[in-house]
Image (cartoon, rainbow, N blue to C red):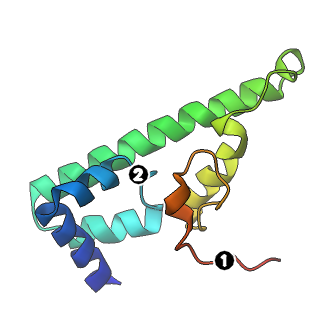
Amino acid sequence: MAQNARYLLDELAENAGFRERFRASPGLCVAHFQLAWDTSRTSEERALLRDTELDAVRALLGEVNEHLRKQRAEHRNEPSGTEADSWQRALWLTGGWPAPAASAGVPESAGEDQPVRPSS
């Protein structure tokens, strides 16, 4: 696992396109963020990880708050948007579940390589 984290950090340092896609991503789950953080060697690597994760968490929190707002009786008739599955993405971000393939908040290509979560 540490080898994968090092690969991620090397790609981020060497590949501007990869870095841009990472910055626009929905972040890393907490366990992988911690692994990447612990594997990082420079303050620049840590700043990129921190800033990306903070942006992802803030955006997701905004969507969770919007989802909760729309659950109240006075807003139930409002159409759902990307916030509809935000609660699932919050679980993924904190617990490490694969992102929902049909998530409105995850780019189409982001779910293609995700492993299938076993059903309970």
Measured in 3D between alpha carbons, the distance from the residue under mark 2 to the one under mark 1, in whole angstroms, is 20 Å
Label 2 SS = loop
Q: Quadrant of residue 66?
A: top right
Q: Quadrant of the C terminus?
A: bottom right
Image side of residue 18 versus residue 62, left or right: left
Q: Residue at x 82, y 29 (%)?
A: 71
Question: Looking at the image, is 75 positioned above or below residue 54?
Answer: above
The residue where tag 2 is placed is: 25
Q: Residue 23: x, y in percent? A: 31, 48
Query: Label 1, on which residue?
Result: 116
The structure residue drawn at horizontal position 54% and vertical position 40%, both measured from the top left corner, is: 60
Is residue 97 left or right of 67 when viewed as pictured?
Answer: left
Q: What quarter of the picture does the N terminus occupy?
A: bottom left
Mark 2 packing: few (<14 Cα in 10 Å), some, or many (20+)? some
Tell me which residue sits at (68%, 53%) in the image.
Answer: 88
Measured along the vertical axis of the image, is residue 74 above or below residue 84? above
Rendering coords of residue 115 (x, y %): 59, 78
User: Toward the viewer: 112 or 26?
Assistant: 112
Q: Position of residue 44 (x, y in %)?
A: 11, 53
Q: Secondary structure at mark 1?
A: loop
Question: Along the horizontal axis of the image, is 110 left or right of 90?
Answer: left
Q: Find out whether the residues at labels 2 and 1 contact each other: C-beta distance under 8 Å.
A: no
Residue found 64% across the figure and 62% down from its top: 101
Q: Quadrant of residue 35?
A: bottom left
Amino acid marked by disc 1: Val
